[in-house]
Amino acid sequence: MSDKLIKSLENKRVVPLVQSDDPKTALKISEALLEGGLDVLEVVLRTDAALDCLEAIAKEFPNAHVGAGTVLSADQSQEVIRRGASFIVSPGLDAASVKVAKDANIPILPGIATATELQQAWNMGLRTVKLFPASLVGGPKILKALSSVFRDVRFMPTGGVNPANLNEYLNVPAVLACGGSWLTPKDSIESGDFGAITQLAKDAIVIAQS
Ligand code: 3PG
């Protein structure tokens, strides 16, 4: 994983999900998050326009870390790299996607939910993974159990993380950062209240630093 990305993750400790079906809106969401102080963004491939959103954000904000999330295959991995993703996140572990990312020298955080999946990721040479869906597979408790065995692995729990439990996750020493969609609520986006997103980003940073 690139040192610069690790540093930003260590520093901000929160990775917001950006989901939109319109690149212009995606840019506004990203701008709001950056204004709030978050500079690692995960653009999720969950709409038909997601790749266009990713490309637009990566072009507009070259100093941010703009990654692609919900990447399911090697083909998608190749495509998001072509569109400018500087890292890849996937819900599960896929060897072909890991190979594409490694060949391109792009960090990849595959999702793991069990010790077996983590061991497979570890044997692929990965030392940073996503725990997904974090709240359903054991939350901070499973992170403590896994990190006592896989001592050199760092985690990005995602799925069910929110302002109320963020600290509990971040207090686990092996947790690098938490990902989540709570920073980009659909209703704020639909009503054009991007100031609310900036405020959520600022609040998350305060929680992460407390
Ligand atoms: C992900 O893709 O990482 C999750 O869907 C995010 O989960 P959340 O919506 O509970 O934050």
Image (cartoon, grey):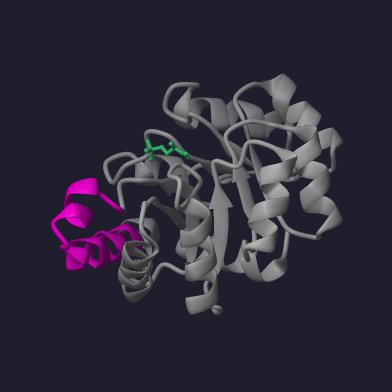
Is residue 61 among the parts visible in the rendering?
no
Q: Nearer the viewer, residue 152 or 56?
A: 56
Residue 80 vertical placement versus 165 (above, below): below
Q: Position of residue 51 (x, y in %)?
A: 53, 55
Does residue 122 appear to the left or right of 154 in the view shown?
A: right
Q: Position of residue 99 (x, y in %)?
A: 83, 44
Q: Which residue is drawn at the image coordinates 62% and 63% (left, top)?
A: 83
Q: Nearer the viewer, residue 206 or 58?
A: 58
Q: Nearer the viewer, residue 79 or 140?
A: 79
Q: Which residues are magenta?
A: 184-206
For the C terminus, the quadrant is: bottom left
Q: Which residue is drawn at the image coordinates 65% and 34% (left, top)?
A: 147
Q: Residue 157 magenta-drawn?
A: no
Residue 164's quadrant in the figure?
top left
Residue 58 vertical placement versus 73 (above, below): below
For the N terminus, the quadrant is: bottom right
Residue 86 vertical placement versus 155 (above, below): below
